[in-house]
Image (cartoon, helix red, strand yellow):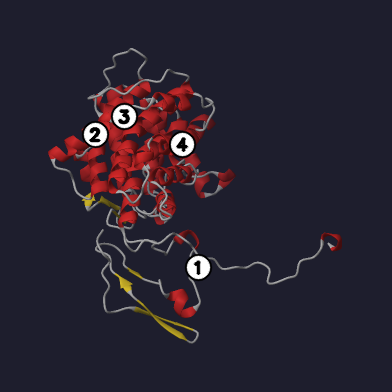
Amino acid sequence: MSAPLETNQPAHLSLGNADVDLPRVEATAGGSGVSIANLLAKTGTVTVDPGFMNTAACTSDITFIDGAKGILRYRGYPIEQLAEHSSFLEVAYLLIHGELPTLPELEQFVERIDRHMYLPEDFREILSIQPRSSHPMAMLGAAIQTMACFYPESMDPLNPAAVELATVLLLAKMPTIVSYIHRRAAGHALLYPMRGEGYIRNFARMTFADPGEVVDLPDALVDALDTLLILHADHEQNCSTSTVRLVGSAQANLYSSISAGVAALSGPLHGGANEAVLEMLALIRDSGRDVKTFMTRVKDKQDGAKLMGFGHRVYKNYDPRAAIVKRSADKVLAALGVTDELLDIAREVEGIALQDDYFVQRKLYPNVDFYTGIIYRALGFPSSMFTPLFAFGRLPGWIAQWREMMADPTTKIGRPRQIYVGHALRDFVPITDR
């Protein structure tokens, strides 16, 4: 991890009788910051920042976002180039190890993951006895936490060999676990991974094939899955990534930390946006109203009409991932011979939003979730699986962020402060006198 650069021009804060110099922390790209690490000690005062909108909890050299310009880079590489030229496992290596792998490094990395995709029979049994009605994200979080029981030799967060093993095991088991969750909910028999078939192709076969069936999966299906996973692989200090770091700051093992990230992602404000987009498009279709009428209702805030899949907490421009997903949606539906009325509605919604001053002035551009659900649906996934697929893609970023934090000598256990606004001191009253 690269050390932050401090200049000789600190910010200056006058607070009551205290004057405090706040050292600057310079970024290599994007906004810099000021360190308030000594603010409490010098002034007895803390800052208040609900939602951490103005607080950097760490420095990081993994992912860079410029929301105003619509830029997303992994380790300095534009997301557009990685989505076009790279594979998901190559991007995972980049995020986790800091550089693009050489061919021998990638081959060794892929081979090791391929070798560990199989789940022990007892592990399969645990997944098999879960009720079919279980929430997929609850099953996923439980399965990842269960890995700590099966692989205790990989739990030590301070042992580099154990951390590397846990990294490989998580990347290897995730596609198998997600495919099992999908098949369990559908009442289908669980399939084993096949060595040498390829990471994404293996996942797709385990998810969609019938037992004993030899399936020639369309390249468009495999490529679309690969691209979607790359686009979700990391996104800086979002809610789930911050959760992974916070849990890991207590030196919790990688499995516990990732499981906590899954729990955070399960919240509808974080991981459920693409499902909400499909619900909105279906509502437009089923209501019998045209898209222009719906968009007018959104602007007039009629009947709680909401535009889902537009706008982003970080991006104030066109989400760079959204443009890639849109092209992928066109290719997938064409290659699979699928026509989807919801895609036509989505295109019309986007066209109006990009031209109407109401939406343009509010910087409501399509985000990555807008077309993602349509692709997943075309590939054959129910909406309940959309968030587990999000977690599948985000796994390398979570791992990379956890490893970066563990290697940072300045890391401290997370312990946010608060401003107490409750009762002042008062005496206990016996129950007979209340």
Q: Which residue is mark 2?
A: 112
Residue that extends furthest to the top in the rendered view of this protein: 212
Give the residue type at disc 1: Val
Whether residues under marks 1 and 3 lie with C-beta atoms below 8 angstroms apart, the answer is: no
| Quadrant placement of the N terminus | bottom left
Q: CA distance from mark 4 to mark 1?
A: 33 Å
| Quadrant placement of the C terminus | bottom right
In the depicted structure, whether residue 231 falls above or below residue 184: below
Give the residue type at disc 3: Met
Determine the secondary structure under disc 3: loop
Whether residues under marks 4 and 1 lie with C-beta atoms below 8 angstroms apart, the answer is: no
Residue that extends furthest to the front in the rendered view of this protein: 153
Q: Which residue is mark 3?
A: 117
Q: CA distance from mark 2 to mark 3?
A: 9 Å
Q: Which residue is mark 4?
A: 275
> Residue 48 bears which disc, if any?
1
Determine the secondary structure under disc 1: loop
